[in-house]
Image (tube, helix red, strand yellow):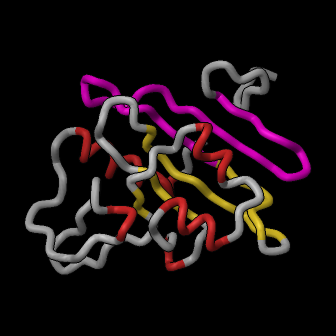
């Protein structure tokens, strides 16, 4: 389910995990980035990067949220300053790195799609897990304990 446009986010998380954080950062991080992200010299902070772990509990908070609530939850404005795409980045074991795409209708989130991997003690990414929610269709999740899997065999 990982699309090429999201490959950079996963590479960024992998680089952080390997201890390759950007050096000589000069840009001021956004509020939701202060614990995990610094931009490269001369680069503006990426407005979609957040230190928010993408756990199922957090992702459920996005269901029916307004754009302002979404921005407050992530602590960053979203890609291109729009609250529709975010990346969670962290290198603490158990942190859920990944991305979230959001769709709005009538001023509230009506659909979300997320792909996450858990940062492991050895610095590697765990298995990829999908989480999806649609206001009309409900939720699917590849997280442990889910009864409705996103990637269940057909």
Compare residues 94 and 137 and report the one nearer the observer.
94
* Residue 104 screen position, x and y as percent: 76, 68
The residue shown at (77%, 59%) is 64
Q: Quadrant of the C terminus?
A: top right
Q: Is residue 131 magenta?
A: yes
* Residue 150 screen position, x and y as percent: 72, 32
* Residue 13 screen position, x and y as percent: 33, 46
The residue shown at (38%, 53%) is 51
* Residue 40 screen position, x and y as percent: 19, 69
Q: Which segment did they paint magenta?
A: 114-142
The residue shown at (16%, 43%) is 19
Image quadrant assignment for residue 143:
top right
In the image: residue 24, left or right of residue 93: left
In the image: residue 55, left or right of residue 141: left
- Residue located farthest toward the left when viewing the structure as drawn: 24
- Asked if 6 appears above or below 76 in the picture, the reply is above
Compare residues 8 and 54 and report the one nearer the observer.
54
Image quadrant assignment for residue 24:
bottom left
- Residue located farthest toward the right when viewing the structure as drawn: 136
The residue shown at (34%, 45%) is 90
- Asked if 20 appears above or below 23 in the picture, the reply is above
Compare residues 74 and 80 and report the one nearer the observer.
74
Q: Is residue 123 magenta?
A: yes
Image quadrant assignment for residue 44:
bottom left
In the image: residue 112, left or right of residue 15: right
Query: How many numbered dots are placed on residues in this image?
Result: 0
């Amino acid at each position: 389910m990982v699309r090429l446009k999201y490959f950079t986010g996963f590479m960024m998380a992998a680089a952080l995990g390997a201890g390759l954080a950007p050096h000589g950062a000069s840009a001021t991080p956004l509020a939701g980035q202060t614990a995990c992200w610094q931009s490269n010299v001369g680069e503006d902070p990426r407005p979609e990067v957040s230190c928010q772990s993408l756990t199922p509990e957090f992702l459920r908070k996005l269901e029916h949220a307004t754009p302002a609530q979404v921005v407050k939850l992530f602590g960053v404005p979203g890609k291109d300053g729009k609250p529709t795409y975010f990346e969670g980045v962290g290198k603490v074991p158990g942190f859920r790195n990944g991305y979230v795409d959001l769709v709005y209708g009538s001023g509230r989130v009506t659909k979300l799609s997320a792909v996450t991997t858990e940062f492991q003690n050895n610095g590697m990414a765990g298995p990829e897990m999908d989480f999806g929610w649609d206001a009309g269709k409900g939720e699917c999740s590849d997280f442990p304990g889910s009864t409705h899997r996103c990637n269940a065999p057909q």
